[in-house]
Amino acid sequence: MTTTRRGTLGRTLYYVLTGGLAIIFLFPLLWSLAASVSPQASTGQVNGFGLGLDLTLTSRQSVPRRT
Amino acid sequence: MGVAYAAPTAVFVAVFFITPLLLVARMSLSSWPLLTGNGGLNFPKNYLSIWKNALFGPAVVFTIEYTLIVTVLLIGLGLGLALLVQERGRWVDMLRTVILLPVSLGLAAASLLFWGFYSPSIRPINPILEQLGLIHDPISFLGTSLSALLSTSFLIVWKYSGLYMLIFLVGLQAIPDDLFEAAALDGASRIQVFRHITLPLLRPSLALALILCVTGSLLAFDQFYILTKGAPDNSTVTVVQLIYREAFQKQNLGTSAAISIMVLVALLVLNAVQFRYLRSSEPGLKR
């Protein structure tokens, strides 16, 4: 195997390995981002996007302060 | 003058470190129910009751198993990643950022994220693995003791390997280039360079990583509290979870403090041994 070919193979392996690592490290974060704009919470509904979760959050009342 | 400079730190340490420590030591010697407060001296019953606790032995064994797995994985992967991304470039810079991203997440938030990941009702992983043809039946990530241990270890490795990569990267960058150039001139192979130059000169970084990793793993709580709560069948209860249960479920602060003191002593001994070993074998250090 020539040096150039070995270099190309090495580089390809490097990019495959580091690309795989990037996917492993990014996937959970991207999934949580996608899940945060899913239409309804805890229903397993995967089609479409919405701000239902954020609206649920804003509709939550704060704990009343003692006066 | 020196005393004046040291005084603020000394006061801070005394108020926030030594006083709570003394309070815990006093608690460990007393009968101290959570709601009624100090009930008087109870030595040595709190310490003796630890050995009668059926969960203590399994919790210690589980915590040690978890520590071993996480330490080996984190230090191995951290060092591997540091070697992989030590040469700068646009792709490498991006990769470093991606690997470091999970470190910025809180441990509780990351644990909740992975709880969703592993959950049988939300489960994004099983459908993907099924579609890829890698599995036929859904995997129960938190269903058995071993799978829960491995799944939690994966979460910790995912979250912290960026931090360990950073520690090793700093260590690698502190090694003078001359040494590598001299080794290249002498015709040393990559493995020889790694074994005889990189690894010995990375010893301070290794020591730091080892102490951080072992201490952090022995004190594991959040991840197991959120992911497993000790299930299945109390097989994933860690020592700190046991301390929590004694204090807030059994409402017995005395026994809880006694276990805390034992963990503290174990950690002090372990760290002293690690320091001694790593310093005594430091290259060029005269003792």
Image (cartoon, helix red, strand yellow):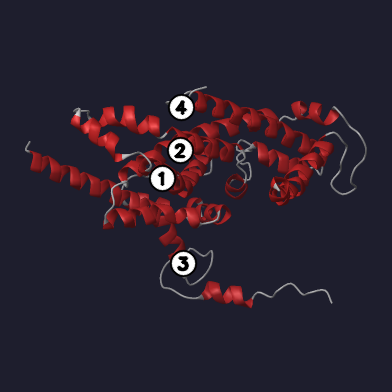
Q: Residues within 10 Å of mark 4 (few under 14, many from 20)?
A: some
SS for dot 3: loop
Return the residue nearer the eye: B1 or A29: B1
Residue bearing mark 3:
A45
Indicate which disc residue B282 carries.
4
Q: Given contact means CB atoms under 8 Å apart, are the residues at marks 1 and 2 in contact?
A: yes
* Structural distance between the alpha carbons of marks 1 and 2: 8 Å
Identify whether A64 is placed above or below B223: below
Residue at 87%, 49% (x, y): give it.
B35
Q: Given contact means CB atoms under 8 Å apart, are the residues at marks 4 and 1 in contact?
A: no
The residue type indicated by label 1 comes to Val
Residue bearing mark 2:
B205
Return the residue nearer the eye: B89 or B57: B89
The residue type indicated by label 3 comes to Gln
Quick one: label 2 or label 4, which is nearer the N terminus? 2
Q: Residues within 10 Å of mark 1 (few under 14, many from 20)?
A: some
Q: Nearer the viewer, mark 2 or mark 3?
A: 2
The residue type indicated by label 2 comes to Ser
Q: Nearer the viewer, mark 3 or mark 1?
A: 1
Q: Chain for mark 2?
A: B
Q: Chain for mark 1?
A: B
The residue type indicated by label 4 comes to Glu
Asked whether the residues under marks 2 and 3 belong to the same chain, the reply is no
Residue at 59%, 34% (x, y): give it.
B63
